[in-house]
Image (cartoon, helix red, strand yellow):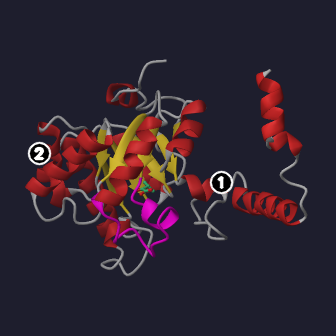
Amino acid sequence: MNKITIRDIQKLKGGDTPFATITAYDYVSAQNADAVDIPLLLVGDSAAMVVYGMENTIPISMDELIFLVRAVCRGTKKALVVADMPFMSYQASVEDAVRNAGRFVKEGGACAIKLEGGTPYTAQIRAIIDAGIPVMGHVGLLPQSYNLSSGYRIQGKSKHEADKIIEDAEAVQESGAFAVVLEGVPGDLAERITKLLDIPTIGIGAGPFCDGQIQVYHDILGLYGDFSPKHAKRYGNFGVEIQKKLAEYKNEVEGKTFPTKEHFITSKTQLEKNH
Ligand code: KIV
């Protein structure tokens, strides 16, 4: 199978079958997602929380993300890898935006970047695209604006807020984005935006009427403690499974039942093998 391109993602607009995308943060998670033909992997700034243990996504840096982007690209043969622009990597200037998006592509190996925000960042989106880098938009609930919105709150419940989100989504499309994430908005609003736009919408906490869905890898696999956001379904509880297996390993080492003779050699067996 060939590498997925942004054109392939754009073709998924308006299809009968919604498409699934997911975040990935390392070689193994990328390999797992690629093995089941998930077409787009986002190296999300959610890595701040699920990889680095930060309280929210605000503190993560470009350098902390670039290492993860590289690992994800190494684990991916097919999926389109999108790198998430962290807080303050693009907000202050168009020049910052182009330079940092360029780092993700040149140093990280990503094919595209994502950035949060609509109307205020159209200049950044256009300039990044002019530099040859595809952009995925992100409107609605913007985790990087955590302080401004006094926490993570569903957006677009009032008419005023809904109109603003529609305006943002349209601005992102007009600026040339190939797809847009709709996060934390009512399902009917997401449906309206999906019908309005020509580019694919990818929902998270935005109901079933988007062209595609995205979820955080750790949320759906139960790898991030007991925390489970409302929008996430847990398909497994692998954090608990891993702990059980680690406890087994620890007990076997302490009980001297591991390692056994099939797990090591002695100089004598080595000598016998050589003759
Ligand atoms: O950082 C992230 O994981 C994201 C997705 C939730 C869309 O932005």
Alpha carbon distance from label 1 to label 2: 37 Å
How many C-alpha atoms fall within 10 Å of the one at disc 2: few (<14), some, or many (≥20)?
Answer: some
Amino acid type at image mark 1: Leu
Circle 1 sits on which residue? 221
Circle 2 sits on which residue? 127
Magenta-colored segment: predominant secondary structure: loop
Left or right of 232? Residue 214 is left
Residue at 45% x, 69% y is 154
Give the percent coordinates (x, y) of residue 275. 80, 20
Report the span colored magenta: 44-62
Residue 12, quarter of the rendered image? top left
Amino acid type at image mark 2: Ala
Count of residue discs: 2
Give the percent coordinates (x, y) of residue 77. 47, 28
In the picture as drawn, the residue positioned furthest to the top comes out as 1
Magenta region includes residue 55: yes
Residue 12 or 223: which is nearer the viewer? 223
Residue 229, quarter of the rendered image? bottom right
Q: For the residue labelled by badge 2, is the local secondary structure a helix, a strand or a loop?
A: helix
